[in-house]
Image (tube, grey):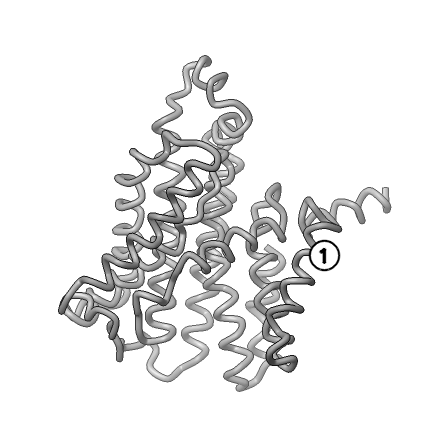
Amino acid sequence: MTILAVLLLLPAVLGDSRYLFSVLMNCMGLSLIALGVWLTFTIGRTNICQAGFALIGGYATAIFLAHYHMNFWLALPLSALVAASAGAVIGSFILKLRGIYFSMLTISLTEAIRLAFLNGGDFTQGSRGITDLPQPFGDSVFGLYYLALALLGFGLLLTWRIHYSRVGRIFRAMRLNEDLAESFGTHVWRYRVIAFSVACGLGGLGGSYFAVFTQSIYPQSFSVEHSIYYMLFCFLGGLEFVSGGIVGAFVLTILFELLSQFQQYQTLIYGGLMIAVILLLPNGLMAMTLRRKEVRA
């Protein structure tokens, strides 16, 4: 929760720097989507289709706003609900798979969702996407910033509450041994679908935010590459920590921005640093806080 408090007070320090605000808003949106990936990890599944559900949420918001002229505050939760419902339906079939088979299928699913919107005709505007979406706060960057912060706070609170509840304990038991959990009377299939649908709902919520943040949505707005990044955010931050995906998203996104001065070497340096961190800190950046506590003790 410390990071939320810092983000709440940052606007007083940043002044009117639109660039810094846009970087932080991007970080918060990515963190929200990554929370869903982290939640899927808790049931022992590697989710590489989160970008597909972010795309569903983004397009749902764009269609509600552009085609039906719906109020944004109604379109936002409805878009998350659409993504969560799609996740529940799709998850009821694909969650029977495990390991590499599930991961490979989710990669294909992301591409299938992208192609569906690409070939959606006039309804999705094909490769042109849906543009000129109205922003709920007009030209106010502060409004969008605090909206991103509120959504991130909601996502973190929801994920934290699930993780430390009875449902969260069942998720962790399933990750360790699904067969053993089922032998104790746990309806494993039902809990898999619940976890996946909530994760997809968070992805849809993040996609909805990005649609109004950029005032547009395209089939290429979220791709397999983005899904891999969401997964890396969780690995880098730490899979054992609820806020691991948030820390990873902020660190990697800001690092990439700082390396922009190296131009054509930006991606190479970025990849090298990321590999080094993962090798040196296999349990994630958040594990450093535990080490410090142990040293103090």
Report the number of discs.
1
Q: Relative to 245, say whether 93 is above or below.
A: above
| Residue 279, placed above or below residue 164 | below
Please give the name of the residue rendered at 29% of the width and 34% of the height, measured from the top-left corner. Answer: 93
**Residue shown at the point (80%, 49%) measured from the top left:** 292
Asked whether residue 74 appears in the rendered view, the answer is no
- In percent of width and height, residue 14 lies at 59, 81
| Position in image of residue 213 (x %, y %) | 38, 73
- Residue 210, horizontal then vertical, whole percent: 38, 67
- From the image, which quarter does the C terminus lie in? top right
Q: Is residue 201 toward the left or the right of residue 19 in the image?
A: left
Task: Residue at 50% x, 84% y: name it.
Answer: 18
**Hey, which quadrant is residue 97 in on the image?**
top left
Q: Is residue 233 left or right of residue 97?
A: right
- At label 1, which amino acid type do we have? Ala
Image height of 129 relative to 84, above or below: below
> Foreground: 198 or 223?
223
Q: Label 1 belongs to which residue?
A: 276
Q: Residue at x 36, y 61 (%)?
A: 207
Secondary structure of residue under mark 1: helix
Q: Is residue 58 visible?
A: yes
Location of the N terminus by quadrant is bottom right
The percent position of residue 211, horizontal first and vertical second, equals 33, 69
